[in-house]
Amino acid sequence: MSHPALQYDFILFDEAQDANPVTTDLVLNQRCGLVLVGDHHQQIYQFRGARNAMSSTDGSKFYLTESHRFGAKIAEVANRILFVKGETRSIQGKRPNDAVGKLTYQKPFTTICRTNAGVFEQACLVPDGHQIYFVGGMDNYQFKRLEDTYHLRQGRPELVKDNYLRQFETFEALSSCADQTADPELRGLKYTVEEYGKDIPKLIRRINSMMVSDETKATRLLTNAHKAKGLQFAQVKLADDFISLSDYQTRCLGGKYKESELEAEINLLYVAATRAQQHLEIDEELLELSKPSSSKPSVTVSAIKSGADLKPSFFKRVFSR
């Protein structure tokens, strides 16, 4: 790059926790006033090569620890999640009358999953008579890759269309790769195909028949944590394919897994939980940790740098190594 000098008096660099290294280099080499805004607990794009630009500067730090999206109860869940990372500042939820517990299923709600395979599983669980809206569109949830994985298991590799999956000549080869890697998506494809087998084409047709393109007409909204980033929903249910807090702590101590990978997983859980505005449904482990009787958490949020229904048990295997 030619290191251009941009003719600005001031630059505000938002979402700095997941910055492109090239953009970071360009911005940090400017001589004008500079403010970097971000929350390192929402850094979830390391797999794309994104970096936390705020860690590359020595500017003054200021913290935003109040949220008007949700209230004190949902904030407590967020605080418990960040507590396991060693955060010492607490989020304060300012929205009145929020709740943590079973949702009001008679009203539309959003289920947020960790993986695309989780989105498929949750779509399969939606009862007849409901309308499903996929946030960002159904094509973004890799159902076609699921069909390709199904074809591999059926011994029909010639039907596989995905360029990445075409490198596997057999389902066994894909399965072996999934077991040896830390890719939750690949493991999710493997376990979903093993779980549903020959029913997959029929299930995909059923899901297609229930899908609507207008969010306002849906009774069930489905998304994954990456696509939910930056959005908010009145009622949110977290699927059970996220890493558990106990697993996170065990793996950190074990030293077998990359710290950056584990941190990204806990960050995804935090991002998903903080999409809720009024009502959040979480699993029993996280619910128990979020009760006032639990040990007091230390927690928190946005760092601003300035310078000049059912919970399928098989998903637990996705993260069990």
Image (cartoon, grey):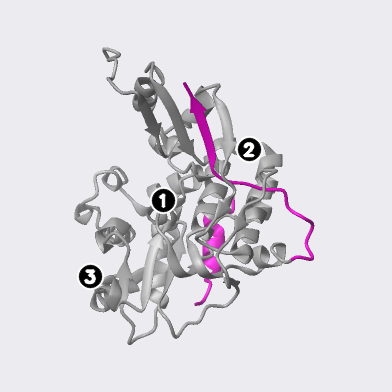
Q: Is residue 319 above or below residue 102?
A: above
Looking at the image, is mark 1 or mark 3 earlier in the sequence?
1
Marks 1 & 3, CB-CB < 8 Å contact: no
- Which residue is found at the position 43% from the left and 66% from the top? 233
Estimate how packed mark 2 is, as few (under 14), some (14 to 19) or many (20 or more) residues with alpha carbons within 10 Å. Answer: few
Magenta stretch: helix, strand or loop mostly: loop
Q: Is residue 93 visible?
A: yes
Indicate the amino acid at tag 3: Ser
Give the numbered dot on residue 172: none
Alpha carbon separation for disc pair 2 and 3: 43 Å
Q: Is residue 314 above or below residue 158?
A: below
Looking at the image, is mark 2 or mark 3 earlier in the sequence?
3
- Which residue is found at the position 58% from the left and 36% from the top? 62
Asked whether residue 203 is drawn in magenta, I would say no
Residue highlighted by disc 3: 213
Out of 153 and 275, give the one closest to the viewer: 275
Alpha carbon separation for disc pair 1 and 2: 19 Å
Estimate how packed mark 3 is, as few (under 14), some (14 to 19) or many (20 or more) residues with alpha carbons within 10 Å. Answer: some
* Circle nearer the viewer, 2 or 3: 3
Looking at the image, is mark 1 or mark 2 earlier in the sequence?
1
Residue 229, position in %: x, y? 42, 52
Indicate the amino acid at tag 2: Lys
- Which residue is found at the position 44% from the left and 35% from the top? 16
Give the numbered dot on residue 186: 1
Residue 302, position in %: x, y? 54, 43
Q: Is residue 37 above or below residue 130?
A: above
Asked whether residue 320 is drawn in magenta, I would say yes
Estimate how packed mark 1 is, as few (under 14), some (14 to 19) or many (20 or more) residues with alpha carbons within 10 Å. Answer: many
Residue highlighted by disc 2: 256
